[in-house]
Amino acid sequence: MGNNIRNGLGIAGLIIVLDQLSKWWIMEKVMRPEGVEGTPFFTPLRVAVTPFFDLVMTWNRGVSFGIGNTDGSWNVVLLSGLALVIVVAMLIWLRTAATPLAQVALGGIIGGALGNVVDRLRFGAVADFLDVHVMSYHWPAFNLADSAITVGAVILVVDSLFANRVSTKN
């Protein structure tokens, strides 16, 4: 296995583990009232952390920002399948990633996508719990996997814009 694949998969594995641990912690320790057992789809709870950041418990059955957040019977299969197709494309790209930064970015996207697939297969929805807000405007709730995907995509754009640039100053 080449260094590109090894590096990217190492990052992906780390993201999956951290994502699933953070979701377990939120669902089992922070949001579940003491002694309450049963389904993970319990009443949402909000824990204020700072004036602009809360922990919440929401379930996203759609894609980013809750688009398509319905109880559609095919959501789990279609969205998990789409995520797996994207992961395969990212793995192909990872084999030829030219920079360590691109390897990290692709690993983050792969790990984030797979972290959310795990949720879809376990719960039929993705656990979101990070809520950033300003006054009454709330950014859609997200999780560590979503963050890894977003940061990975931004890094890929920056890397593609500035990688291999040679100064032409005389």
Image: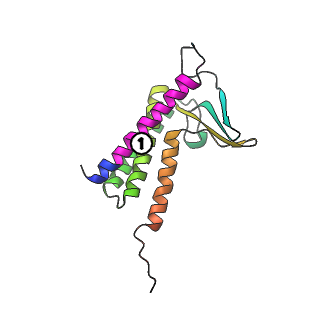
Can you give x and y, in whole percent of width and height, for residue 148 in the image?
48, 45
Label 1 packing within 10 angstroms: few (<14), some (14-19), many (20+): many
Q: Judge whether residue 38 can be spotted in this image.
A: yes
Can you give x and y, in whole percent of width and height, for residue 76 in the image?
48, 32
29 inside magenta stretch: yes
Q: Is residue 7 above or below residue 30?
A: below
Q: Given the image, on which type of amino acid does mark 1 rest? A: Gly
The span shown in magenta is 8-33
Residue, disc 1: 111
Figure quadrant of residue 98: bottom left
Name the quadrant of the C terminus: bottom left
Can you give x and y, in whole percent of width and height, for residue 29 in the image?
54, 23
Q: Is residue 147 above or below residue 56?
A: below
Residue at x 59% of width, y 24% of height: 31
165 inside magenta stretch: no
Figure quadrant of residue 87: top left
Residue at x 52% of width, y 42% of height: 146
Figure quadrant of residue 46: top right
Apparent side of residue 21 relative to residue 32 in the rendered image (left or right): left
Residue placed most toward the observer, 54 or 79: 54
Disc count in the image?
1
The outermost residue toward the left is: 1
